Image (cartoon, rainbow, N blue to C red):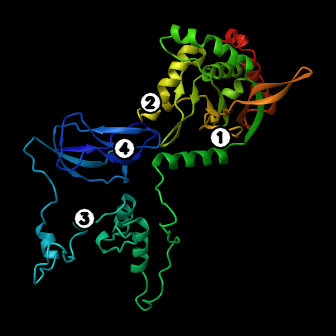
Amino acid sequence: MAEIIVPELAESITEGTIAQWVKKPGDKVEKGEFIVELETDKVNAEIISEEAGILKEILAEEGDTVLVGAVIAIVEAGDAAATPATPAPTPAAEEAAPAPAVEAPKAAPAPVVVEESSSTERVIASPAARKLAREKGIDLASVSPVDPQGRVRVQDVAAHGTASAAPAAKPAEAPKAATPAVDESRVTVEKMSRRRQTIATRLLEVKQSTAMLTTFNEIDMTNVMALRSRKKDQFQEKHDGTRLGFMSFFTKAVVAALKKYPYVNAQIVGNEIHLNNFYDVGVAVSTDDGLVVPVVRDCDRKNFAEIEDAIGGLAKKARDKKLQIADLQGGSFTITNGGVFGSLMSTPIMNGTQAAILGMHTIQKRPIAVGDEVQIRPMMYVALSYDHRIIDGKDSVGFLKTVKELLENPEDLLLES
């Protein structure tokens, strides 16, 4: 017999949420086979079985929060293990259930009083409802669901717990729920994923613990778009299919500006300012589970093709939920591109302990004064959000102006890189 244990994933991760069981009780599993997906605040991890056999028992439901080191399933070695469909009633359960005088018809079985562990498995309930019922010591079989299909939801458990606690002297008095009941015909309730909860917590922490300001500028994208148009086919042929995008231009411009304004590449540690002498740039990637920021290492040492390859590879890993902890750690600066969704302007929030973040936006043709003429040019607003405790206004404006100048004169950018 082998226990499936939540493994240690990283020093900063102490718990996770069961996202999906790939196997069910009674299924055969091979050694090293992926049987359950665990969602943490950073990545989704695939947990494997260390032994071949039969999945005998699942000890944590989808949606449950489990600690590192917790046993979440049992695998019985060998092929001859009994298939654990619905377990036979234990003597204790049989004693607890009063024997009916007449056997109830199979089409409409009469309710019986059984142990909570047995009855809850036969009740249709959401993971959140099961968790709340365990915490409150409520038998799910005793909860009356509002759902016409009979599915017990967390609101039903909360209402049941409140009703049970109501004074016996006032049975007609309506229970006072801690939160108002949700009319599910008008509102769809979704549980926040662990990653979404972590994103919310981290963003609030940044807003509350930094003196964040945002400065704006706009970039005339005419020259970089023309250069990209001229060189993209040759670039793709030379670099085995790698496409030349805008992100490599922006990354190179950011690295050059960080070298000129080192405090933008710094962070506060206690009462010290740590100036980073490396250029690991995080690139925000949107996934179905929320925003993640994998890091492109040593951007100052990479050419355009290497940066495009790194960004493309990390974005694919993010969408396929294959990112590792190491892919997300150690960035010194972040670039986020709301322009891919059509955003014209925004104030991005800094990532973790970093001192600044650059926000790119959609390219839009606008009338611009060029000398004494008005011309239609492809323009992009850019925003730099920064921690004013480290970065003064002069440096923030200078940094963004440097990025603008390099992108408007991409030949200079090639020399800088």
Q: Earlier in the sequence, mark 4 or mark 2?
A: 4
> Which residue is at 17% across, 75% downward?
96
**Residue 8 in sight from this viewpoint:** no
Q: Earlier in the sequence, mark 3 or mark 2?
A: 3
Distance between the alpha carbons at the discs numbered 1 and 2: 24 Å
Q: Is residue 8 left or right of residue 99?
A: right
Mark 4 lies on a secondary structure that is: strand
Which quadrant is the C terminus positioned in? top right
Name which residue type carries label 2: Lys
Residue 375 position within the rendered picture, expressed as x and y whole percent measured from the top left? 83, 24
- Name of the residue lying farthest toward the left: 80
> Which residue is at 64% across, 32% downward?
267
Question: Foreground mark, 1 or 3?
Answer: 3
Question: Foreground mark, 3 or 4?
Answer: 3
Mark 3 lies on a secondary structure that is: helix
Viewer-proximal residue among 264 and 404: 404
Which of the numbered marks, if any, corresponds to residue 38? 4
